[in-house]
Image (cartoon, helix red, strand yellow):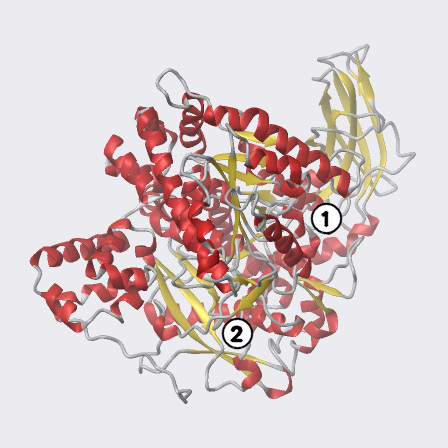
Amino acid sequence: MKAIRRFTVRPALPAPLAPLSELARNLRWSWHTGTRELFKAVDPAQWAAAAGDPVRLLGSVPPARLAQLAGDEVFLRRLAETSDGLREYVTGARWYQEQSAERGSELPRAVAYFSPEFGITDALPQYSGGLGILAGDHLKAASDLGLPLIGVGLLYRHGYFHQSLSRDGWQQETYPVLDPNELPLTLLREADGTPSLVSIALPGGRSLRAHVWQAAVGRVPLLMLDSDVEENDTGAREVTDRLYGGGSEHRLLQEMLLGIGGIRAIRAYCRLTGHAEPEVFHTNEGHAGFLGLERIHELADQGLEFDSALEAVRAGTVFTTHTPVPAGIDRFDRELVARHFGPHAELPRIDVERILRLGMETYPGGEPNRFNMAVMGLRLGRCANGVSTLHGKVSREMFAGLWPGFDAEEVPISSVTNGVHAPTWVAPEVFRLGARQIGAQRTEDALSVGGSERWDAVAEIQDADIWELRRDLRNQLVTEVRQRLYASWRQRGAASAELGWIDDVLHPDVLTIGFARRVPSYKRLTLMLRDRDRLMELLTHPERPIQIVVAGKAHPADDGGKRLIQELVRFTDDPRVRNRIVFLPDYGMAMAQKLYPGCDVWLNNPLRPLEACGTSGMKAALNGCLNLSVLDGWWDEWFEPDFGWAIPTADGAATDDDRRDDLEAAALYDLLERRIAPRFYEQGPGGLPDRWIEMVRRTLTRLGPKVLAGRMVRDYVEQLYVPAARAHRTLGADDAIELAAWKSRVRAAWPRVAVDHVEASATGATAELGATLSLRVRVHLGELTPDDVEVQSIAGRVDPEDVIADARPLPLKAVGGPDAEGRRLYEGPLALDRTGPFGYTVRILPAHRLLASGAELGLVAVPSEGTGEAAGVLLR
């Protein structure tokens, strides 16, 4: 019979074991080996049955075992040490506190970090892929560094789906039912003990209410909003049912709850706990963009006009874009958004048209009737960034329409290259080897803090120890693969009697290649199958075989991705190769933590430049796995032939997609056959693959410090959080009013701003290297004054189309007042400091002390044809 009500019965821990509850509910255990080993010692069999989840473990340990442990002095000492270690970790001074002591109030008092998904641990399954894992690593690294950050997300009652395969290899989805009371969460409660409730208004007088659950991620609180509450009607209760599920309105409501409800959850949390109010609000991808509207609404309640409130909100907002393709951005129909805002729904103090203007694609190439969440994020954020150097460039090109008149390189989107949380992703065996060879504290510092001097210590580890470690990790992966493959085939309907072949799948001494990620078409899951005969030869080579482990999920609505999985699965089912290539369903964090360390080579072959960053290769690298990748994402900026291989691409060739795939697949086969496999199997005088081991060592010493999430979070602090906090403090109400009024005046006057005439006279007889030109520019400023603008010269080398490369802007000076026709004269020198084709032009930009950049307004005036001698100068 089915229960009419479900609830959780928690065990009563004996008093001496009470610290176990606190340890289980702080997710630091998910990356702290000592805490996990403590829980394993509680009951090894139950620990395995609980899949390494301490909350589940404590709910299943027999009372007799708990009573035994309560009298075990050795265990109690170990428990006290671990509990004290957590307390010191949570309260002690770390990097951020040291920086605060040196720099005073320059650092933000707190940062709010919003993301639609967080990958902390499999015990809290609230992620689908790289975006969530990155967000989880961001929180963990912030905790390690002592950054006062508050995470904000949604609590999905079904999480993301579990993946299995049908007999013919088609992806099938099932959704778990998650009870928050069985997760490492606590409910945010008011002072009287009642659950804190966040509410947003819906059309038709309805409301969407949500409880706020808290997860402790080390020092960092993660607030997760849950709409499955009794106060909601059926439709509202289902808003947080699934991650990335439902249609457009469902997604819109999720994103309204995340952004608007998330701000209200932070206000409640800070009120109830005394946590410092955030000065910086970081929007991790566009899903949470509505947080800016709620903050504008808060200021409107305080009497600030919309434009002034917008400036105040922008000052402290950071927006990170993660997608290099427009199709990856959430976009909604204009009317759908309009229906959910305004007097009869949410944010009644804000005119709906003002809200719509923030997200509409009102630029060349956009769809004027579409509300774009990334566009709103950029318009609401003073600071914006991509997640690798190449992705920053791609993002500037993709969003250049928002800054018309500016070259793509001047679009105000910077980049902070992603990193990964080493304590989460480095295998315990790797840590133990480091601890044995160079000391536990030195190894822990290298993983958490970074610094090349710490990673240089890897050079002290002997070749034999590295190779023994690599074989041990490979052997563990072989065991894991066989277990998972057996379970998968049983799910597909196979009988045990027909699965004896699985005992021979993979071998611990064979070169092992890993490929695991989401399965959109641009990641090219099946590129390796372009020439199946050649792949079979590589897999079955008599002297230098390779073996490949593949995993990945397609979105439930992506039949194209499911067909790619089915195509690969059918190949792996072939008896001729099934002992050398496998597909493992239900890719998640637990599988990844075995897969990255166990592989020798990590394969990544997206269509360049469509991989924003691609952090899976970073996690592999931290375990001594070498990267084999297209020069995309992070590999494009950090690749060196000393520690990996670059797959040649045909992205610049005039080829169709099939031809391009053929060329790049052939290049992949060539690398595997001629360079990678021979180096792996080649033995030096001592019987070890010396050259391979040296590449492993260089991967660790050169890449290790770069790929850390600690480095990434420090970059965010220095490059984005500190400037945003400074702007937030600078732009008080009076300054916000001033800036908004100035922008309104400049926009209205700009159509009458123009470059009237440009002339140049050489101070020397000829235009030779080292000579100086004197520029004279006459401009019309209309109703504006010289204080409202900056007139610049732009000079540099020119290409055959007269486009200026590596341009350098220099301000020109105003000379005197306006002439009889209202024109103003600007002058300045132009040094001819480079040989070859050299050109210059001039432009007028808005200028104000409170602007983040001259491009902020997207306004520029440049010479039109016939305005003077603004032509190129050829230097000899």
Q: Which residue matches tag 1?
A: 403
Q: Would residue 388 be found to the left or right of residue 266 on screen?
A: right
Image quadrant occupied by the N terminus: bottom left
The residue at the point 62 percent across, 74 percent down is 250
Task: Identify whether 222 is placed above or below 538.
Answer: below
Q: Would residue 704 be found to the left or right of residue 340 on screen?
A: left
Q: Would residue 687 be found to the left or right of residue 827 on screen?
A: left
Look at the numbered disc 2 and give the secondary structure of its residue.
Answer: loop
Q: Is residue 694 visible?
A: yes
Task: Report the amino acid beneath label 1.
Answer: Trp
The single residue placed furthest to the right in the displayed view is 866
Task: Report the amino acid beneath label 2.
Answer: Asp
Where is residue 760, by image quadrant?
top right
Task: Give how far across and how far down residue 820 sits, in percent.
Answer: 87, 40
The residue at the point 28 percent across, 49 percent down is 33
Given residues 539 and 706, the one toward you in this image is 539
Q: CA distance from mark 2 to mark 1?
A: 38 Å
Q: Which residue matches tag 2?
A: 241
The residue at the point 64 percent across, 35 percent down is 534
Look at the numbered disc 1 and give the secondary structure of its residue.
Answer: loop
> How dense is the environment of label 1, judged by Cα within 10 Å: few (below 14), some, or many (20 and up)?
many
Q: Would residue 348 be found to the left or right of residue 871 on screen?
A: left
Given residues 304 and 515, the one toward you in this image is 515
Given residues 556 and 484, the one toward you in this image is 484
